[in-house]
Image (cartoon, rainbow, N blue to C red):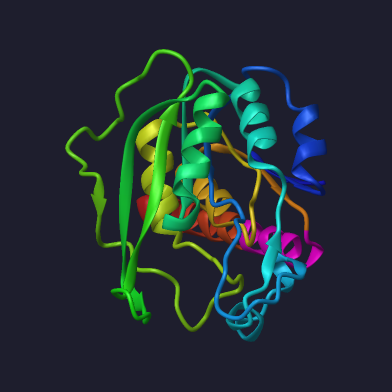
Amino acid sequence: MNKTDNITLLRGDCLELLKGIPDSSVDCVVTDPPYKLVGGGHNKKIVRFSKLSSAEVGKGKFFEIPETSIWMQELYRVLRNGGQFYCMTNDKNLCDYLSSAKSARFHLLNILVWDKGMATPIQYYRKDIEFILFMCKGKAEYIRHMGDTALIRGCKGVYGTKVHPSEKPITLMERFVCNSTDKNSVVLDPFMGSGSTMVACANTGRRGIGIELMQEYYDIAVKRVKDAQAQLKLDYNLSQKQEI
């Protein structure tokens, strides 16, 4: 475990670590879970998401992933009544996630569409969007910026300098965090990856709990959060000096 200021990062299996989080203690969940992905070919060997290279994707290999229905139920348990849940997915897994979320008793508020500002070339229209299931537990609360649209533009995907195969832009996660929580609220990401959601929490004054299985990405997340917090302190000290 690594705890710096208000951000707690845990390394291990989320299905086990979520058991240690009390009922109704989380204000919001923002996550991009691993899911099955098929490129081409017929090799159905199971491999871990973090070990998957672009070459292996092209051979049709699968990610090793936890059962969706199980972690959805755990997220419902730890989320407070009225708390909101952002779950990113692709078109292939959309129906499965919707079904699991319904079984876990989440209410679907909207399906957001993120315009990534870049496209993956395929033969059936280039893929330049990603879906986000926007859900809640219990009675729905209004988002903080009610003028925002379900089509999200202006948060370009990470390309070329990625530290994780499915790294998401911090600005995108900040949008979700700021729309569904207030400062000092608790935000959970059970599939933290390289820590974009946790950096968003640090940048916006939220308390974060991040869980990541793979040591490589956990270490990257720890560094990114520490760097973000150090920058915030530096900016604060500079502003204080300018006021004197």
Question: Camera-side residue: 79 or 185?
Answer: 79
- 75 drawn magenta: no
Q: Main secondary structure of the magenta part?
A: helix
Q: Is residue 182 visible?
A: no
Q: Quadrant of residue 134?
A: top left
**Height in image: 57 above or below 171?**
below
Image position of 185 (left or right of 34): left
Relative to 103, say whether 176 is above or below: below
The residue at 31%/52% (across/down) is 113
What range is drawn magenta here?
214-226
Q: Position of residue 165 (x, y in %)?
A: 59, 71
Whole-percent x, y for residue 147 in the image: 17, 37
Comparing 109 with 169, the one in front is: 109
Question: Tag count in the figure?
Answer: 0
User: Relative to 222, is 96 above or below?
Assistant: above
Magenta span contains residue 224: yes
Name the outermost residue toward the front.
42
The image quarter containing residue 239 is bottom left
| Residue positioned most to the left | 147
